[in-house]
Image: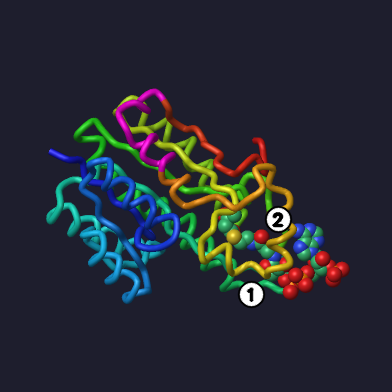
């Protein structure tokens, strides 16, 4: 039977590419989304991938939704924590809500989702968790104390849970994307983005599919000896 894979933020941007790549690799994929009903409906009709609307920053809602997904699609064996938001501003202009929303959505979501699937994975003795971090969690970024702290937290979370899961057949890895051509990156002011792209040795933004291929690899049986690691996919912008 095909393995069930759950991708948070899985209907748009990098998440959409991950969902479709996992489906292409034979997984029974389920995609979560939080707000954009229209995009999710269009995604579902186009790809045939079922979508579930819930807020990954809400612990109880993650627990209930995972339980519903598992009763409808079988135990989640692959979890991709991809959902994330930006609320960029320099610290001296940043509202508490912009700190809190980003930390809850980008980092606490990893706890909420992993907590909801981990007991099942431990029982079956198999699991693949891939957390989407960021180059800006590795290197920091002007205007992103919230995002950089949350993404950096994901990298620590990954190493700690990697140690806990290893003996139970559960691998936990992170991917740290660089600047990828998505709506999130297109929202960066043009002049700022031009300067960033000029610092990417490969000379272009990345494609979402280039991140998705990394996820498919880390989710596969071939990656069973890789855990607690971070795969940087950033066109050489930051060599960590
Ligand atoms: N390093 C040093 N100084 C910088 C800087 C940088 N990277 N970026 C801007 N500055 C300077 C500017 O030159 C400017 O200086 P002057 O006043 O002397 O000219 C000053 O900071 C203020 O800059 P802004 O006019 O841009 O200030 P603002 O308050 O309007 O906006 C900002 C600040 C919101 C941070 C804006 O610069 C911005 O959006 N930056 C992009 C942040 C970014 O890269 N976000 C990534 C989003 S994509 C993502 O996060 C995905 C991923 O994982 C990679």
Indicate if the residue with disc 2 has its beta carbon within 8 Å of ligand 1.
Answer: yes
**Where residue 15 appears, x then y in whole percent?**
40, 56
The residue wearing badge 1 is 95
The outermost residue toward the front is 203
**Where residue 154 appears, x then y in whole percent?**
51, 47
Q: Which mark is residue 196?
A: 2
The vertical placement of 9 against 178, above or below, is: below
Residue 219 is left or right of residue 176, and the answer is: left
**Where residue 156 appears, x then y in whole percent?**
53, 41
Q: Residue visible at 67% across and 44% down?
A: 237
Which quarter of the image is occupied by the N terminus? top left
The vertical placement of 48 against 76, above or below, is: below
Residue 4 lies in the magenta stretch: no
Q: Which mark is residue 83?
A: none
Residue 191 is left or right of residue 114, and the answer is: right
- Please identify the quarter of the rendering in which residue 42 is found: bottom left
Q: How far apart are marks 2 and 1 (CA)?
A: 25 Å
Residue 193 is left or right of residue 131, and the answer is: right
- Label 1 Cα neighbours within 10 Å, binned few <14 / some 14-19 / many ≥20: few
Dominant SS type (magenta) = helix
Dividing the image into four quarters, tell me where ligand 1 lies: bottom right
Q: Is residue 91 visible?
A: no
Start-end of magenta stretch: 213-225
**Where residue 131 appears, x then y in whole percent?**
44, 46
Residue 90 is left or right of residue 24, and the answer is: right
Which quarter of the image is occupied by the C terminus? top right
Circle 2: element type: helix
Q: Residue visible at 54% across and 58% down?
A: 181
Mark positioned earlier in the residue sequence (2 or 1)? 1
């Amino acid at each position: 039977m095909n393995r069930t894979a759950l991708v948070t933020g899985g209907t748009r941007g990098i998440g959409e590419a991950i969902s479709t790549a996992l489906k292409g690799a034979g997984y029974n994929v389920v995609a979560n989304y939080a707000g954009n009903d229209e995009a999710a409906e269009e995604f579902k009709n186009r790809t045939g991938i079922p979508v579930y609307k819930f807020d990954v920053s809400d612990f109880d809602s993650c627990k209930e939704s995972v339980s519903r997904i598992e009763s409808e699609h079988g135990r989640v064996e692959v979890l991709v924590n991809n959902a994330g938001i930006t609320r960029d501003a320099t610290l001296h202009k940043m509202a508490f809500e912009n700190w809190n929303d980003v930390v809850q959505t980008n980092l606490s979501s990893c706890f909420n989702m992993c907590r909801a699937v981990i007991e099942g994975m431990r029982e079956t003795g198999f699991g693949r968790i891939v957390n989407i971090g960021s180059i800006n969690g590795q290197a920091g970024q002007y205007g992103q104390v919230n995002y950089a702290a949350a993404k950096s937290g994901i990298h620590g979370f990954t190493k700690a849970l990697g140690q806990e899961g290893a003996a139970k057949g559960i691998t936990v890895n992170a991917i740290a994307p660089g600047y990828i051509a998505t709506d999130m990156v297109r929202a960066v002011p043009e002049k700022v983005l031009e300067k960033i792209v000029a610092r990417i040795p490969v000379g272009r933004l990345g494609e979402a599919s280039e991140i998705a291929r990394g996820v498919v690899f880390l989710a596969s049986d071939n990656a069973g000896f890789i855990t607690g690691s971070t795969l940087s996919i950033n066109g050489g912008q930051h060599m960590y």
